[in-house]
Image: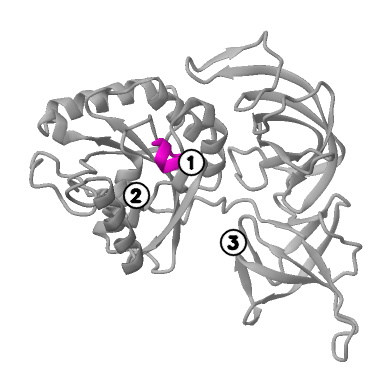
Amino acid sequence: MEIHQNQLLRFTTAGSVDDGKSTLIGRLLYDSKSIFEDQMEAVENSSKKKGHNGIDLALFTDGLRDEREQGITIDVAYRYFTTPKRKFIIADTPGHIQYTRNMVTGASTANAAIVLIDARHGVIEQTKRHAFIANLLKIPHLIVCVNKMDLVNFDETAFTEIVSQFRSFSSKLEVTDTHFIPISALLGDNVVNPSEHMPWYDGGTLLHILETLEISNDVSQDDARFPVQTVLRPQREGYLDYRGYAGRISSGSFRVGDLVTVLPSGLSSTIASITGPGGEIEEAFAPMSVALTLKDDIDISRGDMIARTTNPPVPSQELEVMLCWLNKDAAKPRSKYTIKHTSNDQKAMIKEVLYKIDINKLEKKEDDHSLQMNDISKVRIKTTRPLMVDPYVKNRLTGSIILIDDATNETVAAGMIV
């Protein structure tokens, strides 16, 4: 399988408190030689001040200084590193239950999720919660790292028992690609370098799996979707008749000559030209940013969507959405918000809360219709004008929305269209 050097993999890390996420990411950065010299020096000095004999790997990723002093990591910390095979963005999210919204934020654009399990404790409630959120967000690849294998004497039976526990639980989920790795983030076993302590494990290291995951099919290839961000009318010599539509392809591909439909108007035309950053091209695909021109002069504006005529999205004013409430203030009944979907902004109202999910028990609570911070609920939303949507399970980009409070301009919720 060919891996393109510039291919970007986004992954999120999740685990219970003290499962070793920060140490794991520190080990990944340290052993893959992705640490700058000044960073290394700062961490070495901090480690000495704390009285550590060696380097405290967690300091590479822990948050702000006052958070470190409290001994907790909060919010979502993004880290970047590159190997000869791939570029990576890591979203390091907290394990505490009160930060469910942070995990949803960090995981929303991820290709893969790393779920850490403490080898001494096995699959616990927080493990199930993190796997459930990864499944809810339809993250295509799940990597289960059984950490702290050094504290169970690198015992194969301890590892296989946890794999069995996780498989038993995850059989209820829709996870299609799962990998299990026994690791010691502290000692570096099976993170970047193969472990000498676990000859019984014949799989790849964590970095090897991250470098070789097949992610080219993670973006929907079936649904050709082009949300229009702006209309180009240069009005200068040579371009007086030019009318182009600029944006980023959400999914699928477009070729010159393709028959397309513009929504919500429903009018059809043919693609006359496609222009990328380097000039005219014959074909463009997600996630390229391009400008399209059409053979017919159709009234198109920001927020409209161009789709291939054979497979258009469904315009809808009433949506059923799995909603994660992000704001510290609870939702007010029948409050009005701005809904943002691709490049389209409309006014919207939460008509009804159908049920809330108990994140720990993974059960529906049909009698609870409140929306508090960190709640994940199924709701019905009504918009003033139709949105061109796909189910989130088919298309993560055209199947997602955010809600913005008009009074404060804060993003109060993120949702997946059912």
Name the amino acid, label 2: Leu
C-alpha span from label 2 to label 3: 34 Å
Which of 273 and 182 lies nearest the eye of the viewer? 182
Using the image as rendered, state which of residue 13 and residue 244 is in the foreground: 13
Distance between mark 1 and mark 2 Cα atoms: 28 Å
Percent x, y for residue 230? 80, 65
Kindly check if marks 1 and 3 are in contact, taking CB atoms under 8 A apart as contact.
no
Q: Amino acid at mark 1?
A: Ile
Q: What kind of element bears circle 1?
A: loop
Q: Which residue is mark 3?
A: 287
| Residue annotated with mark 2 | 59
Q: Residue at x 90, y 83 (%)?
A: 235
Residue 282 spot, x, y in % from top left: 63, 76
**Image x and y of residue 365, in percent:** 61, 12
Task: Please give the range of residues in magenta.
Answer: 67-73
Compare marks 1 and 3 and give the one earlier in the sequence. Answer: 1
